[in-house]
């Protein structure tokens, strides 16, 4: 079954892709700026793990912005961002976190969120019929 989009729908899809691309470009720019700034800072003034924590916050912020604009969030970005943030905070606090168990917990939580979100979409489609 093929569906055709009207000019208005095609324009919205193009604008959505442009917005998503702009948000990703901003995130990459922030990562580059943070990397350069941390590289220039004296080693003694920046705790170990700061880059990881910042990277995680930027990825999670990107997904929050995508959500606010009504765009689909990236599951991969959420998982990597959460793990990077946890690893960075662990290093800043001087604790060796169990990364594999944390990753498993984050992946499991992501699967639950995906399953719950999928049910809502399926219910909406069933109600629309």
Image: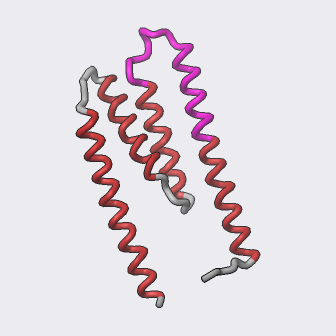
The answer to whether residue 28 is above or below residue 96 is below
The answer to whether residue 63 is above or below residue 114 is above
Q: Which residue lies furthest to the right in this view?
A: 7
At x 62% / y 41%, what residue is drawn?
A: 26
Magenta stretch, residue numbers? 26-50
Q: Residue furthest front?
A: 1
At x 28% / y 23%, what residue is drawn?
A: 93
Instruction: Kindly indicate the quadrant of the structure image that contains residue 83.
Output: top left
User: Residue 68 location, x and y as percent?
Assistant: 52, 57
Q: What predominant SS class does the magenta segment belong to?
A: helix
Task: Please give left or right for residue 97 compared with residue 4 in the image.
Answer: left
Q: Nearer the viewer, residue 16 or 2?
A: 2
User: Residue 17 location, x and y as percent?
Assistant: 65, 58
The answer to whether residue 37 is above or below residue 103 is above
At x 23% / y 32%, what residue is drawn?
A: 98
User: Residue 64 location, x and y as percent?
Assistant: 48, 51
Residue 112 forms part of the magenta stretch = no
Q: Which of 25 and 99 is in front in this view?
A: 99
Q: Nearer the viewer, residue 108 or 8?
A: 108
Q: Which residue lies furthest to the bottom in this view?
A: 129
User: Residue 36 location, x and y as percent?
Assistant: 58, 21
The answer to whether residue 22 is above or below residue 13 is above
Task: Please give left or right for residue 115 compared with residue 68 in the image.
Answer: left
- Quadrant in which the N terminus appears: bottom right
Residue 49 forms part of the magenta stretch = yes
At x 54% / y 16%, what residue is drawn?
A: 39
Task: Please give left or right for residue 26 compared with residue 10 in the image.
Answer: left
């Amino acid at each position: 079954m093929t569906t055709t989009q009207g000019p208005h729908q095609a324009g919205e899809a193009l604008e959505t892709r442009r917005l998503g691309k702009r948000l990703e470009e901003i995130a990459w720019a922030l990562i580059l700026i943070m990397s350069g700034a941390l590289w220039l800072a004296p080693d003694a003034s920046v705790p170990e793990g700061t880059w990881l924590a910042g990277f995680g916050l930027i990825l999670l912020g990107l997904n929050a912005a995508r959500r606010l604009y009504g765009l689909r969030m990236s599951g991969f970005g959420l998982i990597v961002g959460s793990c990077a943030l946890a690893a960075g905070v662990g290093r800043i606090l001087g604790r060796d976190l169990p990364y594999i168990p944390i990753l498993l917990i984050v992946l499991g939580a992501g699967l639950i969120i995906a399953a719950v979100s999928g049910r809502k979409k399926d219910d909406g489609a069933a109600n629309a019929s």
